């Protein structure tokens, strides 16, 4: 069968380096993957097409890219699974990364962020004669996160990284959880303190893009939420993120509905005047568009508050 691929091209050695899209018609089998089609184009139509690949079995993580706007592994994505867009399949390089050429992106910043979280066991005492052992039941919960193949697909679709490139990112945080939750590691508290910085675990917006994109079911966002819980349980509560989380629960416990004004006060602190002033333009625009709710004392609790309070208290006992 014939498929049309609309590929985003970029040649850094061109006289005027500029990204553009180019369409290719290619004959493929029903069972072909997007990577199969790309390799056919490179070998039979345009040998200048740059695409990174290796194992072709969703193991090495080399062939990460975007297909119809969503990050994925080209080798794992069946070309026959796309029906819309008039049959045209748009293939582009991964997002939040510098493009080297065509579909190949620079992975060095990705690996630098992985190194930031010290991705190896840190132990104390004399090393064992053979290996560091742990009971199987103590490692079962790590099976999912240890399946990460470092493909960078989650980083590609991370909305927080689009806004703040200094954010360590979902892949690095999922890897950090892998060691923090490992019973053999002796640096848990220091790791959590390192991640409590402004570019760490509180930068995630919980959009779930990384969960949807991950080809191995690692669920990075879930690991980030677990890191936050571990951090607060360890006493790391003096950050905007931690105060926001605790303030949210406190507001719901007392009013049963979100009070944005009180949540902002609890997050920033009563005496943080400079930060409040910086938010004034946003507050004015919200007020003019009818998006600013009644503040503090005027924001009354909802009926049946005792039921909401009971739910909150029951949930807290389950932790």
Image: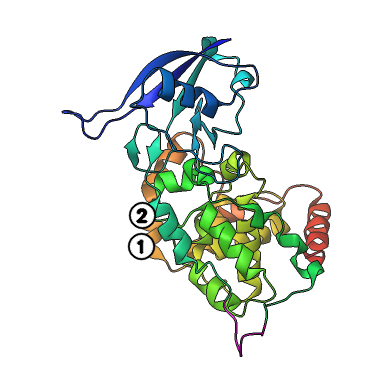
Query: Magenta includes 8?
Result: no
Q: Name the main secondary structure of what is drawn in magenta.
A: loop
Q: Residue at x 52, y 72 (%)?
A: 238
Residues at circles 2 and 1 in contact by the CB criterion of under 8 Å:
yes
Callout 1: helix, strand or loop?
Answer: helix
Q: Residue 29: which quarter of the image?
A: top right
Specify how the rendered protein is coloured: rainbow
Residue 261 in the image: state x and y as whole percent. Answer: 54, 53
Q: Which residues are magenta?
A: 122-129
235 or 227, which is in the foreground? 227
Residue 186 in the image: state x and y as whole percent. Answer: 61, 80
82 or 270, which is in the foreground? 82
Residue at numbered disc 2: 278
Q: Residues within 10 Å of mark 2 (few under 14, many from 20)?
A: few
Q: Residue at x 56, y 41 (%)?
A: 55
Decide if residue 248 is on the left or right side of residue 2: right
Query: Magenta includes 127?
Result: yes
Decide if residue 139 is on the left or right side of residue 45: right
Q: Residues within 10 Å of mark 1 (few under 14, many from 20)?
A: few
8 or 126, which is in the foreground? 126
Q: Residue at x 72, y 51 (%)?
A: 256
Residue at numbered disc 1: 274
Callout 2: helix, strand or loop?
Answer: helix
Q: Residue at x 38, y 41 (%)?
A: 105
Farthest residue to the left: give it: 15
Quadrant in which the C terminus appears: bottom right
């Amino acid at each position: 069968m014939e498929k049309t691929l609309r590929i985003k091209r970029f040649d850094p050695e061109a006289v005027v380096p500029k990204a553009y899209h180019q369409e290719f018609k290619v004959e493929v089998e029903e069972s072909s993957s997007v990577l199969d089609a790309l390799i056919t184009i490179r070998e039979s139509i345009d040998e200048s097409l740059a695409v990174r690949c290796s194992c072709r079995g969703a193991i090495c993580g080399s062939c990460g890219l975007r297909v119809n706007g969503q990050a994925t592994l080209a080798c794992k994505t069946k070309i026959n699974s796309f029906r819309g867009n008039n049959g045209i399949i748009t293939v582009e390089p991964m997002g939040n990364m510098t493009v080297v050429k065509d579909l190949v992106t620079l992975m060095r910043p990705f690996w630098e962020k992985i190194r930031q979280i010290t991705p190896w066991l840190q132990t104390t005492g004399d090393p064992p004669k053979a290996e560091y052992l742990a009971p199987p039941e103590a490692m079962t919960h790590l099976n999912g996160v240890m399946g990460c193949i470092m493909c960078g697909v989650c980083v590609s679709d991370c909305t927080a990284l689009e806004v703040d490139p200094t954010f360590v990112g979902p892949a690095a945080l999922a890897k950090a959880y892998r060691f923090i939750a490992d019973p053999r590691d002796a640096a848990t508290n220091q790791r959590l303190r390192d991640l409590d910085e402004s570019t760490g675990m509180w930068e995630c917006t919980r959009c779930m893009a990384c969960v949807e994109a991950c080809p191995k079911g690692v669920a990075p966002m879930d690991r980030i939420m677990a890191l936050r819980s571990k951090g607060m349980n360890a006493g790391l509560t003096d950050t905007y993120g931690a105060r926001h989380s605790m303030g949210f629960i406190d507001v719901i416990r007392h009013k049963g509905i979100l009070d944005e004004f009180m949540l902002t006060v609890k997050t920033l602190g009563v005496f943080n005047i400079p930060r409040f002033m910086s938010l004034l333009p946003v507050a004015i625009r919200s007020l003019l568009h009818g998006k600013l709710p009644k503040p503090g004392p005027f924001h009354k609790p909802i009926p049946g508050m005792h039921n909401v309070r009971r739910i909150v208290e029951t949930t807290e006992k389950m932790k």
